[in-house]
Image: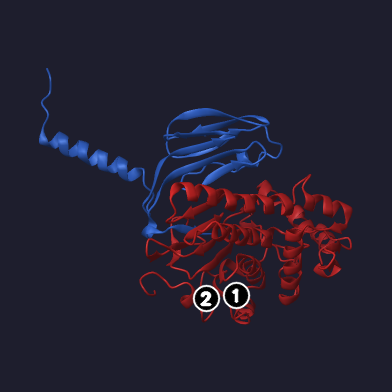
Chain colours: A red, B blue
Amino acid sequence: MDTLVSVSLWGPPPDAAQGAFESAFGALAEVDRTMARVKDHPLWDLNLAGGGVLDPGTGTVLEAALDWAETTGGAFDPTVAPLIDLWDVLAGPHPPPSPERIAAARRRVDWRRVDYDPTSRRVDLGGAALDLGAIAKGYALDRAAAALRVAGVDNFIVNAGGDLYLAGSKGGRSWRVGIQHPRDPDGFLRVVEPREGALVTSGDYERFYLWEGQRVHHILDPRSGRPAAGCRSVTVWAPTAMAADALATAVFVEGPARGLALVEGHPAAEALVVDAAGTSRETTGFAAAAPEVGGGR
Amino acid sequence: MRRRWTWADAVVVAALLVFNLWGFQSRSGRTVSGVEVLGLGSRQVVPLGFGTLRVSGPLGATVVEVGATSARVVSSPCPLQLCVRSGAVDRPGRLVACLPNRVVVQLVGGDDREGVDAVGR
């Protein structure tokens, strides 16, 4: 998943905590092993082969990913791999790709090419390539949370590079989360005490470089083939991290107006958006899902 | 001749101490207390200003430089050099990771910004 994961527990004695940690990290490692698009890993081989039979976890994630792709009209698209490779934001400053190369990569991006049968778990990629990075991290958080509950732990935070699953409390008070300000590295946009569930943030400030004054970041619009331009950051609360993860990407790509409308259509999810001008907007229920410490601004 | 210690000297020394302690904190109150360096089966915590250290991994040695206010990976045997390109980190919680060589460099310390348990980013 190309990120550092931490698990914070409250309450269990050290022996029980150690077992819980091992269960949680085992679940995280299994998702990383099966769903990271890394050479010699199953997803890499699946893309090379153009399809195959998926393991149950990857099947669950792909089925959800295709559902989100349909729901969001392709703002979330699990076949965005050619564009990720083309832009290669992690490689650091370099000239953005030409319009011709972007167009060529876009022709290979279309979730509707993917034919997946959940019963047999057989998939035909139809010439597309999968990258589950925008949803598998959420699934991994959910799996780790489930493993912790099975281990008897009720109060915890699983933190995958700033994407969070929170459960229970910390010694009788709610877990407290600072939402990173997208332009002030030392500042918080807001400090909140979220309800039990996931709080996932997508921003243009974590993985980016500046080229001729333009911010080139890693959240790509599958439809334009370019970094999405409408938002600086999107924070989504949802009961599951997989839903929050997919929605955070989709809202970022859609931009504040259509993105917030998209979330309003999902009664279980809420969102806080900082638009490209730096203005914060949120869904009607975000303040209830993640109350601000101190009771408001 | 040996100069006598005066109250004025004490005030200057106290001011310098306060200034230096303040200098170790960011303007939001995040204090770097050290640098944690994880290798394959190894863990070291060294203070800022420690200098250079080598961490062995499956691909070879990663060289880490721990300066007065930041830490960075100077060289690495990994193919993409993402860890080297990441540059220096200077805030608690920030890290540089070399996944191929299994090395993580993380600044440790308090993130006491309003007493949060986690940062969503």
User: What residue do we see at 75% from left, 51% from top?
Assistant: A37
Q: Secondary structure at mark 2?
A: strand
Residue A225: name its quadrant: bottom right
Q: Amino acid at mark 2?
A: Arg
User: What residue do we see at 87% from left, 57% from top?
Assistant: A52
| Disc marking residue A256 | 1
Residue A116's place in the image compared with B27, above or below, is below
Q: Amino acid at mark 1?
A: Pro
Considering depth in this image, is A54 or A159 the residue closer to the camera? A54
In three-dimensional space, the C-alpha distance between marks 2 and 1, rounded to whole angstroms, equals 8 Å
Q: Secondary structure at mark 1?
A: helix
Task: Return the chain for callout 2.
Answer: A
Image location (x, y in percent) of residue A184: 47, 58
User: What residue do we see at 47% from left, 29% from top?
Assistant: B51
| Disc marking residue A281 | 2
Query: Circles 2 and 1: CB distance less than 8 Å?
Result: yes
Residue A110: name its quadrant: bottom right
Image location (x, y in percent) of residue A222: 75, 66
Query: Which label's residue is closer to the chain start, 2 or 1?
Result: 1
| Disc marking residue B100 | none
Image location (x, y in percent) of residue A221: 71, 66
User: What residue do we see at 75% from left, 66% from top?
Assistant: A77
Query: Badge 1 local density, few (<14 within 10 Å), some, or many (20+)?
Result: many
Inspect this view and state whether residue B8 appears: yes
Residue B75's place in the image compared with A127, above or below, is above
Query: Badge 2 local density, few (<14 within 10 Å), some, or many (20+)?
Result: some
Give the left or right position of residue B114, taking residue B62 as reference.
left
